[in-house]
Amino acid sequence: MIEQLQWQLDAGAPELYQRHLVSTMTSMWATDLADRAELRPGENVLDLACGTGVLARVAAERVGVSGRVAALDINPGMLNVARSLPPPVGGAAIEWCEGSATAMPYPDAGFQAVVCQLGLQFFPDQLAALRQIRRVLVPGGRLALNVFGPIEHNPATWAMADALDREVHPGASEVKRTEHNLAGTDKLRALVDGAGLQEVVLTTTTKSVHFPSVSHYVRAQMTATPLATLLQGYESARRNRILTALTEDVAAALAGYAAESGLTFPQEVHIVLARR
């Protein structure tokens, strides 16, 4: 169950995730995935691994007040942040629920669409989760999900992972590398096919991510993601030395992506569209 444990963020981290990573990264992928899912007014939609709810809110806007959006996540801290944010004006009410992707608390055939943004790679049993998705979809219902592509195609993550192993301890990057454990398209397609989903279309796309600086990127990673646990218990001087070293390492690796306007780098994801 290591994947789920990795995303049990400490107190404060979900708020920092919403503040520093949603606007810079996840919001653009949420809009992209909602577009690809072709969400329509009046539909019932499930946002699986909803986090702080960026995609759920986009879905609520798309389906309108005549629709329904359920949002499921295993992390209570992320859900607390999601509930604290204002609901979308003119959108469906969002039903926030704490629960597992492998044992969803929903009846069969309850949703016209299921969306899952950058979550499948963290599930402890990915095939079981995909079978649950198939179960809760109506016949002909749609799945739209995305996962990160190879770490080598995501230069900021690659630089961060190498720096962690060098400056914290060997293997410190495991949580970052786990983000890319579905980077192989053959494996990803086999999982979706194995769950009995049909009309599978797999595409790969890249978008640009912007941070004000390398320092902002490193500090966001080390405070607003599970990497925050790596420095727990360190006295402040040692923690600051490590953060400085990480920033210097990442800056050197990403020099080609830095400018006066900040740090801008490509991020690659695989997108799966399928039907029950």
Image (tube, rainbow, N blue to C red):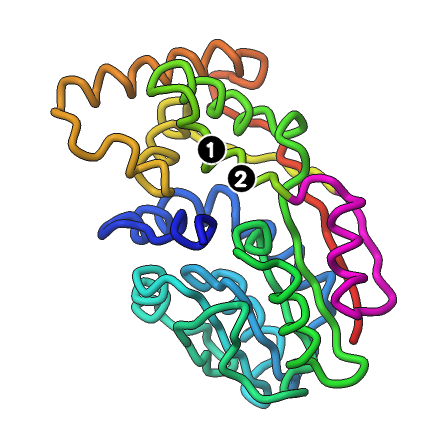
Residue at (47%, 33%) from the top-left corner? 174
Label 2 to label 1: alpha-carbon separation:
6 Å
Left or right, 259 with respect to 18, comes to right
Q: Looking at the figure, which quarter contains the C terminus?
A: bottom right
Q: Helix or strand or loop: what does disc 2 sit on?
A: helix
Q: How many residues crowd mark 1 within 10 Å: few (<14), some (14–19), many (20+)?
A: some
Q: Quadrant of residue 85?
A: bottom left
Q: From the top left corner, tell me how far across and down residue 52 is, in percent.
A: 41, 60
Residue 258 to residue 232: above or below: above
Q: What is the magenta range? A: 182-204
Q: From the top left corner, tell me how far across and down residue 129 is, in percent.
A: 60, 66
What amino acid is labelled 1 in the image?
Answer: Glu
Left or right, 17 with respect to 50, comes to left
Q: From the top left corner, tell me how far across and down residue 266 is, in percent.
A: 63, 30
Label 2 close to label 1 by CB (< 8 Å):
yes
Q: Which residue is mark 1?
A: 174
Q: Nearer the viewer, residue 116 or 28?
A: 116
Residue at (62%, 30%) from the top-left corner? 151
